[in-house]
Amino acid sequence: MCCRGRSTPNRGIAMDISIQMKTEARQILTLALSFNNDGPLGTFFRYIGDTGTYIARYDDLVTGREEPIDVSQVEVSMNGIELQDREFVAAIREGREPNSSAGSMLDCYRVIGELAASLEQQDGWS
C-alpha cells in the first residue's frame, strides 16, 4: 500500500509519502518519507526493527536512546563514498557483480514502479 500527501502548489509534488508492505514471511515493512524538513539536507535516518532502533547521521550511528554504536570493526572506513568505491573496484578485480549493481536493483525498481502506478490510480490525489 502506498499513500501520499497532497501535492504542494509551488512544487507540484507530494512532500510526504508512506509505503507499507508485508513480506512472504509476514513481516511488516513501513517506509515514511517527508521532505518537510526545517534543517540541513540529509539530517538523519531512523531504522526501527525487532532488535532495536538505530539512528544514522552522516557517518555516525547511535541507538534510539542516542547511545553511540562502535562500528570501527565493521569496515575499513566510515566514509560511505569510499566504501562504495572500494566495493566497485573489488568487484572488477574479482570478476563479479558489485553488491549494488543496476541488475541487482531491478526487482526493487519494479516494486517502486508498481507503487507509483498505485498512487496515480488513487482518487483525489494528484
Image (cartoon, rainbow, N blue to C red):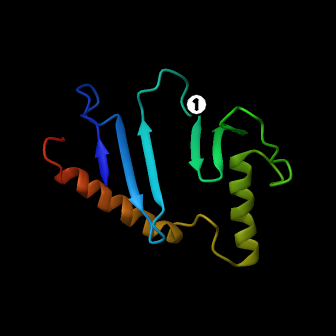
Tell me the amino acid under the disc marked 1. Thr
Residue 112 horizontal/vertical position (percent): 37, 58
Left or right, residue 18 beside residue 37: left
Q: In which quarter of the image is the N terminus?
A: bottom left
Mark 1 closeness class: few <14, some 14–19, many ≥20 residues within 10 Å? few
Residue 42 horizontal/vertical position (percent): 56, 34
Say above or below: 30 vs 64: below
Left or right, residue 115 beside residue 33: left
Say above or below: 125 vs 87: above
User: For the residue labelled by badge 1, is the local secondary structure a helix, a strand or a loop?
Assistant: loop
Say above or below: 49 vs 93: above
Residue 71 horizontal/vertical position (percent): 80, 48
Q: In which quarter of the image is the C terminus?
A: top left
Farthest residue to the bottom: give it. 95
Of residue 50 and residue 40, the one placed in the foreground of this image is: 50
Image label count = 1
Residue at the image position 71 percent from the left and 71 percent from the top: 92
Residue at the image position 13 percent from the left and 46 percent from the top: 123
Residue at the image position 68 percent from the left and 48 percent from the top: 81
Left or right, residue 122 beside residue 88: left
In terms of image quadrants, where is residue 109?
A: bottom left
Of residue 77 and residue 15, the one placed in the foreground of this image is: 15
The residue pinned by badge 1 equals 43
Residue 61 horizontal/vertical position (percent): 71, 40
